[in-house]
Image: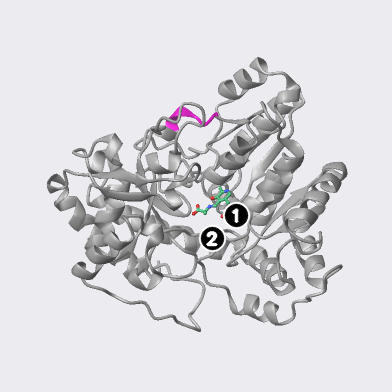
Amino acid sequence: KLPYAEPFRIKMVEEIYQSTQEQREEWLKNANYNLFNLRSSHVFIDLLTDSGTGAMSDKQWGALMIGDESYAGSRSFDALQQTVENITGFPYLLPTHQGRAAENVLFSVLVKEGDVVPGNSHFDTTKGHIEFRKAHAIDCTIDEAFDINDLHPFKGNLDLEKLEAVYRSHPKEQIPFCLITITCNSSGGQPVSLENIKAVKELSDQYGIPVLFDSARFAENAYFIKKREKGQQHKTIKEICKELFSYGDGMTMSSKKDGLVNIGGFIALKNREIFEQASNFTIIYEGFITYGGMAGRDMSALAAGLDEATEFPYLESRISQVEYLGNKLMEAGIPVQKPIGGHAVFIDALNFLPNIKREEFPAQTLAIELYKEAGIRGVEIGTLLADRDPETRENRYPKLELLRLAIPRRTYTNNHMDYVAAAVKNVFERRNDITKGYKIKREPAILRHFTVQLDRA
Ligand code: F0G
């Protein structure tokens, strides 16, 4: 047997810079201990997000050159529409400038005050767009997702009993749709099984509730279905995607993930009437319906990217790199969400830093320590991100307090992963000396994690 190797070679490189611990301490202080405030040149390995940070292929760069910048009826739109329909089966396409814009446009049509939107754990902008409309997102994820050591192969699955309880306790008019996030970012990049998606669809049909997908990482989800779900091994990724989307009424997409582009998003729908209503909002918020905030060339690159992202060899190299890092951390006894998810390794900060109180933000403290240690930037998926309850204004303490190390697509090598693993191990070895976390100096009213200012507690 031969060892595994990436199905690509590198044509262009970008320099990155190392720094000293003293420099990093200074920069952190100036950034008010919020890693979003760091200059990228002050970061050696940037694992803040896998969103818009990947490398495009030569074919995508080629596609940029033949983009059609016509305001209306662009050829690039046609190419994108064709590709999206081929992969998802949804014929009606509205491009947007990124995923949250797709949420804004579609929810402007569908979500109203007092509504409830059940799903597996909603992403923060998605929840933001629901709560901004004075509606509520209800998390119906299976309980296994919140036990990091439970090896359930589909920890993104919805609990059908929890979902049915929502359907039973609210009138149909108050439930505009059920939202399935694939993969489920908030629970650790965990996939949803085809069987679960189908069951959600059947249950929702009984109650007359549409099913939508938040599809940012749909191709990674399809990879896990192929690898883990009984009877799916012989299917291609594209066949799995087609079946998966057949159980839904539409999707929002952040193309910055599985679209393999640096910016962009879209809505794709089965239903013409909703498409027409959403078209009006696209025009006022985003742009004309055949570009919706995207350059023609970016739509061409996206069409090529969606095609590449739904090929098995690409996905295998992508997801095995994430697993490679995860396995190194597990070997060192570091508590991580298991199984390792599709786009990131999630470290359990409550177990990693048991001396830090919840109100002093353990996951943020760990993010800061890792940056200090080695110039690596991760992101807190914990109490800062969970924000305050919109009514009581109290902190919301999520079940898990995680540090996410998101791996950009086709960007870093496994040597970088070795460096990251060594740095995390160093912090782990001195974890008992980390006894103080952080307190809030200033924060905005919503989505506070982006701009919050912190000080040492
Ligand atoms: N849905 C999911 C599941 C996401 O992960 C994101 C973004 C969005 C929607 C919003 O898309 O950024 O294009 O507006 N996630 C990024 C992240 C920001 O770092 O996980 P967007």
Q: Identify the disc placed on residue 219.
A: 1
Callout 2 touching callout 1 (CB < 8 Å):
yes
- Residue at the image position 46 percent from the left and 58 percent from the top: 49
Q: Position of residue 195 (x, y in %)?
A: 62, 35
Name the residue nearer the viewer: 210 or 70.
70
The answer to whether residue 348 shows anywhere in this view is no
What residue range appears in magenta? Answer: 139-144
Q: Amino acid at mark 2?
A: Leu
- Mark 2: few, some, or many residues within 10 Å (few <14, many ≥20)? many
**Drawn side of residue 175 relative to residue 386, left or right:** right
- Residue at the image position 24 percent from the left and 61 percent from the top: 372
Name the residue nearer the viewer: 265 or 165.
265
Residue at the far front in the pictured view? 442
Q: Is residue 188 magenta?
A: no
Q: Is residue 142 magenta?
A: yes
Q: Identify the disc placed on residue 315.
A: 2
Point out the image quarter for the C terminus: top left
Q: Position of residue 401 (x, y in %)?
A: 35, 40
- Residue at the image position 83 percent from the left and 45 percent from the top: 277
Name the residue nearer the viewer: 41 or 347.
41
Above-or-below relation of 379 to 59: above
Q: Amino acid at mark 1?
A: Ala
Q: Position of residue 93 (x, y in %)?
A: 78, 55
